Amino acid sequence: MDEFQLFLKENPDLASELEMGELPALFPNEDIRFDAKEELKKSVSDYDTEFQNRAVAYYEGDLSLSEQNDFESSLSENAAVATAAQQFEKLKLEADRVIIYENKEQLKKKVVLFPLWAKVASVAAMLLLAYLLIQPRDVIRPGKEQLADKLNSKSTNDIVSPGVNLKIEDQEKEKKNPAVTPKTIPAKVPVKLQQTPANQKPEKKVIPAPQLQIPVTTPSLLKPRGISFGQPDDVELAVMTLKDPTLVTKELELSELIREQLASMRNSDDRELLSTDHLGLSGLQLIARLTGKRLTARKGDDGAVHSVSYNSRLLAFSIPVNR
Amino acid sequence: MTIKDYNRAVDTWADGLYRFVLKNLSDSEKSRDIIQDCFEKMWVHRENIDAEKVKAYLFTAAHHTMIDYIRKAKRETSLDWKKVAEPVAHHGYSDLQEILHEAVQRLPEIQRSVVMLRDYEGYSYREISEITRITEVQVKVYIYRARIYLKSYIGQIQSVV
């Protein structure tokens, strides 16, 4: 109060107004109006939209557990609201399973299978050629009468790999009489005729392979260059027919010798020995000998290989060959 | 992805993908073209595609190709593609799904695509967001709007069912 009176003394004009009994007052200006009231109002449709959003959220699985419980309790309290909410449950689209894409096969990519037999044959042929190229130092020098018999595969039905008991006549003889000098390695006939009852063709006589005389020392003419290859005594050579023994007397490198031999075989009756089937079979036999595994090829009357059987300690299977 | 995986994907997803595109475009010829394009793209990029993500890849490719086609078609024609939700009184249809699909055709292409991915393939909001390259929130908004529109379009569902 003292401060107020002090203020009045300092402001005499105000003091005079107070004495007159008129106090200043604030009065609202009623001309100023808020013109967006309608937008703030809530209507039934707003309530509906909110309800609809809640219903959609409920059926979309977007509500928390407590919110679901609240919504379900509100539905239970009002049957009309529950009916309206359930309509959203039926609004889910269903795929028309009758509509299918008809050209699926055109979309697919085809797998090109290289014939297993062709793979085996090519690998075997490569191994055979590699083996022929990498000759041991002890070279075969056959005489006139010491030619290895050629494979006769025309009338065979089963060609048994060397892993099976081969009835090669000189095999036992070789084991009993180990060569001292010169080393004697029999040229093997890897083919043994086995006739089945269904195929009673006259058995072709198997000519036992003559033994080849191999000098202990490697002659310089056919010494492979830069290659050192040891050959165990019991290794049986793959079949190779030397038609012209005089070739070995020429000063030829081993690769040239093989090349000339192959060329002469191509131009003679022995060209059938250069066929894929024959090379593949020879390769199989080579693999069987080197690995000790049992590989058996079954040929048909047409001379074509129809299946390859493989036996090992781990597995055994037969592969049909589709031509 | 191997050839085997690719061919398995053709068997598994070609029908669903074709259905999705066809329901969006209503053009079987164009839909087939899009399906072929999608699988061819997948084949070209197969080394970079994980076998487990094949479905998502296919639907993403189909969705974008489809949307591009629709937008191009809009530019080339004078049709007004803006749809307005107009509630239709029920006419006594016997097949609710037929009515629903008729209603879905009136939705904007993005909403239509989103609803179909949700209902046909059961994708989540996040998966739809990845396929359509819009945010999850936007996906949710589109689905909610679509549902409300479908309800209003159908009108009195009780008598239809």
Image: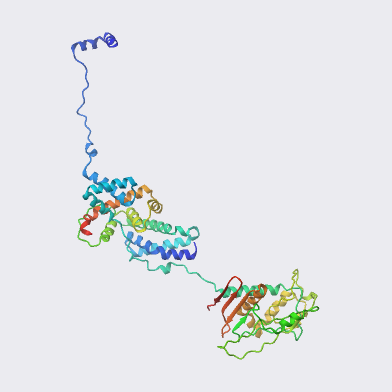
Q: Quadrant of residue B105?
A: bottom left
Q: Residue at x 41, y 52 (%)?
A: B130
Of B141 and A186, which appears nearest the observer? A186
Of B67 and A50, which appears nearest the observer? A50
Q: Position of residue A287 (x, y in %)?
A: 65, 74
Against B28, is A192 above or below?
below
Q: Position of residue A247 (x, y in %)?
A: 75, 81
Of A225 and B115, which appears nearest the observer? B115
Farthest residue, direction top: A9
Q: Quadrant of residue B157?
A: bottom left
Q: Residue at x 35, y 58 (%)?
A: B120
Quadrant location, the N terminus of chain A: top left
Q: Position of residue B147 (x, y in %)?
A: 29, 52
Against B14, is B106 above or below?
above
Q: Report the side of A150 relative to B121 (left or right).
A: right
* Number of residue marks: 0
Against A28, is A132 above or below?
below
Q: Position of residue A256 (x, y in %)?
A: 72, 76
By what rule are the colours in the image chosen? rainbow
Q: Report the side of B94 relative to A201 (left or right).
A: left
Q: Report the side of A81 relative to A137 (left or right).
A: left
